[in-house]
Image (cartoon, rainbow, N blue to C red):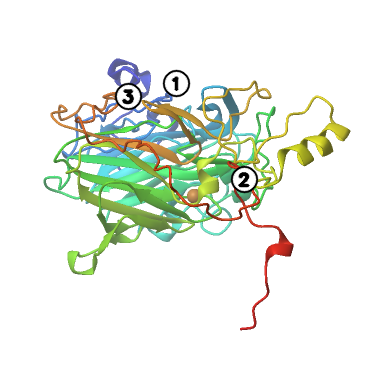
Amino acid sequence: MPSRRQFLGSAALIGAGVVTGRVQAAAIPEAPTMDQVTMQPPPHPASGPDYHPVVTLNGWSLPWRMNGDVKEFHLVAEPVVREFAKGMRVNLWGYNGQSPGPTIEAVEGERIRIFVTNKLPEPTTVHWHGMIVPNGMDGVGGLTQPHIKPGKTFVYEFELKHSGTFMYHPHSDEMVQAAMGMMGLFIVHPRGPSLVDRDFVFLMNTFRVDPGTALPKVAEMTDFNIWSFNSRVFPGIDPLPVRLGDRVRLRMGNLSMTNHPIHVHGHSFAVTGTDGGWIPPSAQWPLTTVDVPVGALRVAEFVADNPGDWALHCHKSHHTMNAMGHDVRNFIGVPKEDLARAVARLAPDAMAMGTNGMSMGDMEMPGPDNTLPMMTGRGQFGAIEMGGMFTVMKVREGLARDDYRDPGPYAFPAGTVAYEVEAPAAEPPRGNPSMQPGEGGAPPMKAMKMRKM
Ligand SMILES: [Cu+2]
């Protein structure tokens, strides 16, 4: 966190007091910046109306200052370096030192003023996705305002008419700026006490960064290889520590190019809101997976009543993989000797892989520079073999109210873990009898009989 002194002690406070009309340059507030990639403790508001803060996975909330009755923020659009996970750092564009930008939090009914300074090499704007604002504050470059040229600062000012979960992103050279990671969340809290104990937020975004490189391919339309929550991939995504019995809210926005069905283990939840507002209880139903469409947001709520380490992930299996291995062929069931012979003709030193699936188990191999293995991460029982959009919700007894530190692996009560038994010796042969143990796969074509329908 930037220190309070750093933020409030700036000379920029001179000139405070301008509450209406066009603000002068001298009144621009300090723009705090963040250099940490881990979840920052939620800042309880020190000024303005009270609210229960959200927690941004691998992120932070933007400090503000009160200028009369107006809450003032300062976003700086700028190039940043983001570590997707240990071993991979990428040149992105973002806000205030990070991609995604900081979460903005305010309260229903407040008037806010957001300064946006452009430190990118090209024009930008900020659109407030889902928010009901006057047309001229909507941030669509060319349509509702001039583009913000490099080096310039624009001001957006409006009243927060509705509580809910919203997003911000450019509406200026959008393809490039979205692919470079420019986006953030905007939370408008309702007035009054919070209905939940833990309120987690994250954005889903995707990138195409080839192994050994450090810059996304911005023209990529479908073939992404980095599937991330808040520009982080497993095992770089923060866990979600939750106290047993807490009422939990997950706010999940999707600013990528495809949908993400997000699945939560061990609990059933209700979707209580979208980027359009709150859903009345009479319209909610139980789910364990919710599809988050492109350019949309879903809010899931549940009581964490089941202790343990629960996976939370996108259910598209390719989206729980990292950069390497997206182009590999399927060799399941191909006899190893044939494959090894064929490969040896082309590459005498190569190793034939994948005839029993692609699990790497505990094997570790050196990879190319600046990329991440396809499947990775470790749990207390071995390799987790995941990447991308995967993390763990850790439901524990007795966590302190604002404690978001990783509580470590779950201590399973004795006798509650799936276990191995001695296989009965009399198991009859299954599948293709000509196949050797461990080979698996489909029977050869000649063994298949066509049947008339
Ligand atoms: Cu997905």
SS of the residue under disc 1: loop
Type of amino acid under label 1:
Asp
How many badges with numbers are in the image? 3
Type of amino acid under label 3:
Leu
Q: Residue at x 64, y 48 (%)?
A: 435
Nearer to us in this view, 38 or 51: 38
Q: Is residue 130 among what the camera can see?
A: no
**Left or right relative to 431: residue 2:** left
Rounded to the nearest angstrom, the CA distance separating label 2 from label 1 is 26 Å
Nearer to us in this view, 11 or 293: 293
Give how far across and how far down residue 108 sits, in percent. Answer: 22, 50
> In the drawing, what numbered circle is on residue 35?
1
Name the mark nearer the viewer: 2 or 1: 2
The residue labelled by disc 2 is: 224
Nearer to us in this view, 131 or 200: 200
Determine crowd level at label 1: few under 14, some 14-19, many 20+ residues with C-alpha closer than 10 A. some
In primary-sequence order, the first of circles 1 and 3 is: 3
The residue labelled by disc 3 is: 13
Q: Is residue 66 above or below residue 429?
A: above
**Left or right relative to 247: residue 408:** right
Rounded to the nearest angstrom, the CA distance separating label 1 from label 3 is 23 Å
Give how far across and how far down residue 421 sits, in percent. Answer: 34, 37
